[in-house]
Every structure is written in structure tokens, then in C-alpha cells.
Image: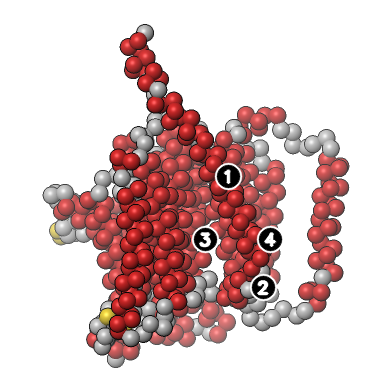
């Protein structure tokens, strides 16, 4: 019974943060509430003894994705857009239909999956060592593909940053651009 | 008797828990462990602040705090933390009118809570791990990454340009130095073959050469390099001088702390010091053998004395470096992380792999060959990367908005 109480508290926390992330008017508040929802999901993972998934969720989503979202919000000047947002969209009906379809698309396969019929194991089902072994043996190809994809993204980011720097070194190498000398010429 | 001194806290806990009826026992056990961690590390926090002020004073040829008296007795400033605590508690808590009140209120709480939680997975002595997690190291870094969000909350909610600039600096610094911090621990995980901190400490037990040389990871080439990288990255992660740009008072007042006063400021202060304690304890656990004694002959001293003694030595090293190094510039800070520490940590991974595959070289001659080979493999990238940091080869610093 105490286990269930913990689950309900975590579920309420996650759902409230998720609803607040949708409903609040200030974009930064929304992003912070989304981070709270991520943390709630991570706690549910930890509650289910999935240590690695839960901690990776905190490390990636709360530590990195939430910060990225916040930077994006600050860079796009969310506060100016705020005034034009209407709380209830005119196309709310199609929105509800779409979300119901997506929800059904997730819940139906889960309900009919054979995994539900197994009784859960008494001890932690996925120790970190087993997880690591299956990563480098069974799932090595997806892991390598993911690594390649991320490396490509990293190189792309570096290339974008490099171009900016080249132009500026060019401009600084021309002595006319220096403000002090410009004033002296004038 | 020696056994008892080593296990005194474990025995005490079992005795106290045994006093209450059965269903309450786990709850009392959790409560006592939490109280012990908060008491001991809270005390260490107070001791660290006074030690820092006294040692900085000595190094800078002044007295440091020395006036405070209690009941008319001179204490040579040693109870200064109590006076500071009372002062912080009774100070007015000023919240700026334009501040985002809720976020401003929550930021110090979000900062300090995860930092306190990191102590749960640290093995503080034989059988003295509060929460022996299978993925303890991952837990530590997950909790550490949550503090970035708190720093952003503090800076943004203050509605002050210095606060926002300070928090942006802090986040850039924390994200940059988290990479070498995590990469420098990976060799330890590879060689110990586990993510559990208890088993990392177990892997460093035992002695060589008749009990004189311990089996600590710092005494291997990859462990030494990893330890130095971890030390530097940890210094930057906990915003300690010479990496204290987020609070550089000569540039941006106090960074994200500018609009905080009273006890909320004290909580940030506490978070910084307790974070430093946690990262020092982590360094001791990963590289300095945890609670193991440095010599077999010294094993009669209780394990927890060794753990806390080593942690205090690392903290003294932090204080010493604060007094002796000037603050570095933001571009130097980021260059140092991405162009020096990260490549060096990656090279260290290769060295750890070589060390792992030459495990069979057991005779004294081959063991020294293995040691020197690994030292060579890490020394070459160190020298090459160090040369690339040479100031003459770098383009002049660009001031994007100042011209």
C-alpha cells in the first residue's frame, strides 16, 4: 500500500507540472514546469527500480534538454509573443481528437502486449551491468548508428560556429575597421 | 576493540533502531542516517568556512576573523560560523519589486536539495554507505546536473542584468566542465567494472610491496591524469576560485547572487560549500582509495577517520588554490575545458584501455614496463595539448560588443 501512495504522489506531481507547462502564460515558467514534469517521470522510473533509466532521464532531460529549452525561449524573446497567445484555440476540437488518437495509439499496444501477462520479478529487473552488456553485444549496431548520428550533429554544430569566427577574423585583420583609427581618419 | 572503533556508528545505529517496535524501524533508520549526514556535513561546512577565512588571512598576511567572544571567553574567531549563521537568519530578506517572486523563492531550495542528496551514495567508511545504489556514480552526476537549472532560476527571476549575465556565465561554465568531469571518471568505471561507489572503493583495497604501497587508482598513470582532470573540473563545477567568474565581483557584482539577501543568500553559500565537500568526497572515493588506509600498518585507525581526513586534505587544497591563483578570463576558461581537458580525458580513456589489456604483465619487470608505457601514452598528449594552449599561437581575443 505505501508503494501505491508514492506512485500517486509522483503521478500527481508529474501531471500537475505537465498541465502547468501547457497552461501558464510566461514561457520561462512553462519551460521550468516542463523540467518539473521530466523530473517527475524520472522519479517514477526510480520508483519502478529502473535506476539507469531514471538517472539518465534526470541527467539528459533535467540537466540538458530543459536548459536548451530555456535558452531557446530566451533567444526567441518569448515575452513579446506572450500577449498574442489565446488560451483556448479555435480549433480545440481537432486538437482533442488528435491527442485522443495519439493516446489510443500508445495505450492499445501496451494493453495488448504480452509483457503485461508476466508477473514482475521480485528483484530489480535490469541491473546496470546487464544493460551495458546488452548494449555492446545485442544492440551494438543501433548504438553505433546513434553514435554516428550524434557525431555528425556535433560536427555540424562546430562547422556552423566556425564560419562565424572566420568572417570576424577577416574583418579584424583590416586595419580600417578599428574604431580609434576610424575616428582619427575622420 | 579495533573492530568496534571501526564499526562504532554502524553498531550505534543498529542499537538505536532496535529500541523501537518493528514497523517503525526502517523509518527511524532513514531518519537517523539523514540526521547524521546533515549534522556531520553541516558541521564540516561551518568548519570549512572558518578554516577558509583563517587560512586565507594567514596566506595574505592578516589575521582573519579573531574578535568574536562567547560568554566573555576569547575564542580566536573559531565560533565565527555561529555568529554568521545568526546574522544571516535575522537579516531582512529583500525581494526586488520586479522579481518573479515564486521562482526567486524556489531557486535556493532547488539548488541545495540535490546537493545534499549526493551524500547518500558516498561510502564514508566500511559498511557506511547510506544508499548502496547499483548506479551510484550516475546518481551523483544526475543530482549535480540539476543545480544548473537552479542557477538559471536564480539569475532569471531576479530581473537584473548582472544576475542574468552571471547565471549565463555559470551555466556555460558548468556545462563545459561537466564533460571533462564525467569523462575523467570513466577510466575508473572501466577498470573497476562497476557503477557502484562501494565496489569502486573495494577495488582499491589491498597493498603492494609488503603493505607499503596501496592499490589506489591515483598511483596508476591513468588514475593520476584522471585525478588531476577531475580536480580541475570539480573546482570549476563548484564555482571556486580561480574559476569564480559567475560571481566575479569586479565585473558583475555577485552574478546570480546579486539580488539575494538574508537566509536565501546563506542557502546559496551553503550550496557552494556543501557542493565542494561532496565533490572532494567523490574525488577521495574515486581516486584516493576511499576509506582505505595508505599503509597496511595503519589499518588499525578506523576507516571513517581516513575518509574524512582525506576529504579535509582535498578541501585544504581547494582553499590553498583559492589564495594563490588569479581569476581567469571567460575565453581562457572555455578554451581550457574544450581544447585541453576534454581531449586529454579522451586520451586517458585509451590509456585506461591499454592498462586493462596489459593486465597479464605481472612480473616486476613487465609491471614497470606497463607503468612507463601508460605514463608515456598520457604524457605525450599532455605536452602536445599544452603547447597548443600557448598564447602566442592563439588569435587575439575578440570583443564582440565592446568596440
Res A156 label: 1
- Element class at badge 3: helix
- Element class at badge 4: helix
Res B23 label: none
Residue B285: x and y, percent?
Answer: 38, 71
Q: CA distance from mark 2 to mark 1?
A: 30 Å
> Which quadrant does the C terminus of chain B fall into?
top left
Q: CA distance from mark 2 to mark 3?
A: 27 Å
Instruction: Read off the residue under disc 2.
Output: A138
Q: How dense is the environment of label 3, judged by Cα within 10 Å: few (below 14), some, or many (20 and up)?
A: many
Instruction: Read off the residue under disc 4.
Output: A11
Query: In the image, B144: left or right of A120?
Result: left
Q: Nearer the viewer, mark 3 or mark 4?
A: 3
Dot 4 or dot 2: first in sequence order is 4
The chain holding disc 2 is A
Q: Nearer the viewer, mark 2 or mark 3?
A: 2
Q: CA distance from mark 4 to mark 2?
A: 33 Å
In the image shown, does A17 or B314 lie closer to the viewer?
Answer: B314
Instruction: Read off the residue under disc 3.
Output: B142
Residue A34: x and y, percent?
Answer: 63, 49
Q: Nearer the viewer, mark 4 or mark 2?
A: 2
- Element class at badge 2: loop
The chain holding disc 4 is A
Residue at image point 46% right, 45% down = B172
Amino acid at each position: 500500500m505505501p508503494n501505491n501512495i508514492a506512485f500517486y504522489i509522483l503521478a500527481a506531481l508529474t501531471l500537475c507540472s505537465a498541465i502547468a507547462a501547457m497552461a501558464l502564460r510566461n514561457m520561462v515558467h512553462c519551460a521550468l514546469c516542463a523540467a518539473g514534469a521530466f523530473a517527475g517521470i524520472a522519479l517514477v522510473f526510480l520508483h519502478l527500480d529502473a535506476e539507469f533509466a531514471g538517472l539518465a532521464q534526470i541527467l539528459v532531460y533535467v540537466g540538458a534538454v530543459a536548459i536548451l529549452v530555456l535558452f531557446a525561449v530566451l533567444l526567441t524573446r518569448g515575452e513579446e509573443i506572450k500577449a498574442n497567445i489565446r488560451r483556448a484555440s479555435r480549433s480545440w476540437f481537432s486538437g482533442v481528437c488528435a491527442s485522443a488518437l495519439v493516446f489510443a495509439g500508445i495505450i492499445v499496444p501496451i494493453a495488448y502486449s504480452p509483457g503485461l501477462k508476466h508477473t514482475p520479478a521480485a528483484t530489480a529487473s535490469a541491473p546496470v551491468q546487464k544493460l551495458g552488456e546488452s548494449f555492446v553485444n545485442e544492440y551494438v549496431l543501433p548504438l553505433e548508428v546513434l553514435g554516428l548520428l550524434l557525431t555528425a550533429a556535433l560536427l555540424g554544430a562546430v562547422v556552423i560556429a566556425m564560419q562565424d569566427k572566420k568572417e570576424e577574423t577577416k574583418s579584424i585583420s583590416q586595419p580600417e575597421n578599428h574604431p580609434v583609427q576610424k575616428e582619427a581618419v575622420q | 576493540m579495533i573492530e568496534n572503533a571501526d564499526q562504532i556508528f554502524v553498531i550505534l545505529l543498529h542499537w538505536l533502531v532496535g529500541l523501537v517496535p518493528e514497523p517503525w524501524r526502517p523509518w527511524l533508520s532513514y531518519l537517523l542516517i539523514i540526521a547524521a549526514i546533515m549534522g556531520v556535513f553541516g558541521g564540516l561546512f561551518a568548519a570549512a568556512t572558518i578554516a577558509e577565512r583563517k587560512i586565507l588571512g594567514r596566506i595574505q598576511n592578516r589575521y582573519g576573523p579573531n574578535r568574536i567572544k562567547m560568554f566573555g571567553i576569547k575564542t580566536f574567531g573559531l565560533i565565527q560560523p555561529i555568529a554568521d549563521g545568526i546574522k544571516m537568519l535575522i537579516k531582512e530578506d529583500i525581494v526586488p519589486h520586479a522579481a518573479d517572486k515564486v521562482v526567486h523563492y524556489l531557486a535556493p531550495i532547488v539548488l541545495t536539495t540535490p546537493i545534499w542528496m549526493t551524500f547518500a551514495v558516498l561510502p564514508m567508511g566500511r559498511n557506511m554507505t547510506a544508499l548502496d545504489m547499483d548506479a551510484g556514480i550516475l546518481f551523483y552526476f544526475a543530482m549535480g546536473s540539476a543545480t544548473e537549472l537552479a542557477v538559471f532560476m536564480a539569475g532569471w527571476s531576479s530581473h537584473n542584468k548582472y544576475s542574468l549575465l552571471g547565471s549565463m556565465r555559470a551555466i556555460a561554465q558548468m556545462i563545459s566542465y561537466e564533460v571533462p568531469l564525467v569523462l575523467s571518471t570513466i577510466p575508473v568505471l572501466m577498470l573497476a567494472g562497476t557503477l557502484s561507489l562501494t565496489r569502486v572503493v573495494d577495488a582499491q583495497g589491498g597493498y603492494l610491496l609488503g603493505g607499503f604501497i596501496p592499490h589506489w587508482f591515483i598511483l596508476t598513470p591513468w588514475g593520476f591524469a584522471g585525478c588531476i582532470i577531475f580536480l580541475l573540473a570539480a573546482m570549476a563545477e563548484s564555482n571556486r576560485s580561480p574559476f569564480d567568474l559567475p560571481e566575479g565581483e569586479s565585473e558583475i557584482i555577485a552574478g546570480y547572487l546579486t539580488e539575494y539577501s538574508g537566509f536565501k543568500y546563506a542557502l546559496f553559500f551553503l550550496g557552494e560549500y556543501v557542493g565542494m565537500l561532496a565533490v572532494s568526497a567523490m574525488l577521495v572515493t574515486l581516486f584516493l582509495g576511499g576509506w582505505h588506509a595508505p599503509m597496511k600498518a595503519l589499518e588499525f585507525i578506523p576507516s571513517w577517520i581516513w575518509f574524512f581526513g582525506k576529504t579535509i586534505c582535498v578541501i585544504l587544497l581547494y582553499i590553498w588554490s583559492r589564495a594563490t591563483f588569479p581569476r581567469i578570463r571567460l575565453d581562457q576558461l572555455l578554451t581550457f575545458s574544450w581544447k585541453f581537458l576534454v581531449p586529454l580525458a579522451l586520451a586517458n580513456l585509451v590509456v585506461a584501455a591499454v592498462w586493462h589489456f596489459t593486465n597479464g604483465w605481472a612480473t616486476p619487470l613487465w609491471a614497470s614496463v606497463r607503468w612507463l608505457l601508460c605514463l608515456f601514452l598520457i604524457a605525450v598528449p599532455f605536452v602536445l595539448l599544452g603547447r597548443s594552449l600557448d598564447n602566442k599561437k592563439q588569435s587575439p581575443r575578440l570583443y564582440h560588443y565592446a568596440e
